[in-house]
Each structure stands twice: as C-alpha cells, then as structure tokens.
Amino acid sequence: MNRAIASFLSIMFALSATVHAQGADLQESAQRPDAACAACHGANGNQPVMPETPRLAGQEYAYLVDALTQYRSGARQNPLMSAMAKSLTDAQIHALARYFAAQRGLTVKY
Amino acid sequence: MTRTVRTRQRGCVKPTGLLFGPGISPVAPAVMLGILTLLDASNALATDPVMQPKVDMCQGCHGIPGYRTAYPEVYSVPKLGGQKASYITKSLKDYRSGLRQHATMRSIAAELSDQDIAAIAAYYAGTKVK
C-alpha cells in the first residue's frame, strides 16, 4: 500500500514538473499542442502508457472539449487530469480537442 | 430478423427449380426442414446472451457517427472503437459507483455486472475477454 502511494506521488511529482514545463510550451508553440498529454496518452494520443489511460486520437472534438472542461471545473474527477486541466484556458482546450480529433485513431464501432 | 433470413433462403432455393420440380417434390419438405433447422441453430448461436456482449444498448448512441445526446443534456458521445479495454472498464465502473456523473450512463451502468463490463470493454477494444 505504501509502495502504491509512493509511486503515485512520484508520478504526480514528475507530472507536475511536466505540466509547468509544458504549460509554457503550450502557449508558445502551436506545433505540438499535445506535448504535455503525450507523457501519458502517447504520441498523438494514440499509445497510452498506463492501462486506464484512454486513447485520444480521433476522439470526437466536442467530447474532448467537454471532458477537459469538466476536469477543469471538478465536475469530472481524476487526480492527474484535474492537475493538467486546471491551468488550461478555453482557447487551449479547444486547440487540444481540435488536435486530437484530427488524429487517426478511434472509430465508431457498431 | 429470422423472418428476413428465411425469406431470403426460400428465394435462393426456389430458382433452381429442383426442389419444386414435378419429379422431386416429395424430397422438398425434408430438405426445407433441414435448411430451416440449420438456420435456426445458427441464429440461436448468434443471439445467445452468453456469447454476445450487451452492446445493443450502447449502439443507440455510440454507434452513430457524430451523435449528440439531447437529454438530459446536450453531450457529444465519444467514439469507443479501438479504445483501451481497461479504460472502458474503469469508466463503466465509475459510472456504476457514481464517481463519474452522467444520468444516462449511470442508469445503464447500474444494470451491468463485472462480467458484462468486461465483455463490453473487450468488444470495443477488439480484444479477448480477460
């Protein structure tokens, strides 16, 4: 249990450093809007590194906007995503959603 | 669905003229019965609730490209094809426990067992049930 907490905290620490570093990038660079996201969701949001992390590539634009907005407001809870979304502006949320929606990945399956 | 398949099957058999020809007609009922029995067996397999994950109730929203729910709120429905199985599992369990909020998804997830959830997650991820 203690090990789980310790590893969680170390992930949080690593990510918070990433968030601060990438937050600046996000504002400065329009080329790689997903830089902060790729640490967990993989390149282009297509190869999540943890089992419970979703693929984002090809996801619906409006769904991604909703998800990030809900994480930012606290309506949807996740320690990592709440921290990531907290500092995002509306414009950044829309830019990220547009980027991931445009990637090749998820499909409508029926 | 069964009716459609049977009609189609009759349509396939009839044009050959063999089964309904004057000389061979006594054989026709037995052959037809055999075909229909086989069809019924395969239909039963396809609709077996144990074999088929409970995805029918997902399809109404998640099976329509670009679909948005209008009730209880306007909400863009996410794509699930190719999504990670463990993420779908987590999402459904979070809806079921109330950790994640969405009226429609909560009421749907409330009906699902752990096995149902695993089967649905595997269906959308395109993997085998773990």
Image: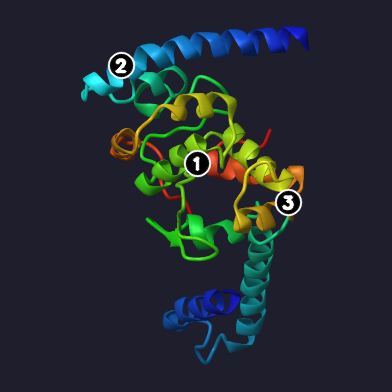
Task: Tell me whether the residue at label 2 lies in contact with that at label 1, contact meaning CB atoms closer than 8 angstroms.
Answer: no
**Dot 3 falls on which chain?**
B
Does residue B58 sit above or below B40 in this rendering? above
Q: Are marks 3 and 1 on the same chain?
A: no
Q: Using the numbered discs, state the Cα–Cα distance from disc 2 to disc 3 in whole angstroms.
A: 43 Å
Residue A32: x and y in percent read: 26, 22
Q: Using the numbered discs, state the Cα–Cα distance from disc 2 to disc 1 in whole angstroms.
A: 22 Å
Q: Are marks 2 and 3 on the same chain?
A: no
Q: Using the numbered discs, state the Cα–Cα distance from disc 3 to disc 1 in whole angstroms.
A: 25 Å
Residue B118: x and y in percent read: 68, 40
Mark toward the viewer: 2 or 3: 2
Q: Which residue lies at the image location 45% right of the left edge and 47% below the top edge?
A: B79
Residue A70: mark in rendering: 1
Instruction: Give the residue at mark 2.
Output: A24
Secondary structure state at the residue bearing disc 3: loop
Does residue A66 sit above or below A93 in this rendering? below
Residue A43: mark in rendering: none
| Residue situated in front as seen by the camera: B52 or A40 | A40
**Marked residue nearer the N-terminal end (2 or 1):** 2
Label 2 crowd (10 A; few <14 / some 14-19 / many >=20): few
Residue B112: mark in rendering: 3
Q: Which residue lies at the image location 38% right of the left edge and 48% below the top edge?
A: A62
Where, quadrant-wise, is the N terminus of chain B in this rendering?
A: bottom right
For badge 3, the amino acid type reads Leu
Task: Tell me whether the residue at label 2 lies in contact with that at label 3, contact meaning CB atoms closer than 8 angstroms.
Answer: no
Where, quadrant-wise, is the C terminus of chain B in this rendering?
A: top right
| Residue situated in front as seen by the camera: A55 or B106 | B106
Q: What's the image's color scheme?
A: rainbow
For badge 1, the amino acid type reads Gln
Q: Which residue lies at the image location 52% right of the left edge and 29% below the top edge?
A: A82
Q: Which residue lies at the image location 54% right of the left edge and 89% below the top edge?
A: B23
**Dot 2 falls on which chain?**
A
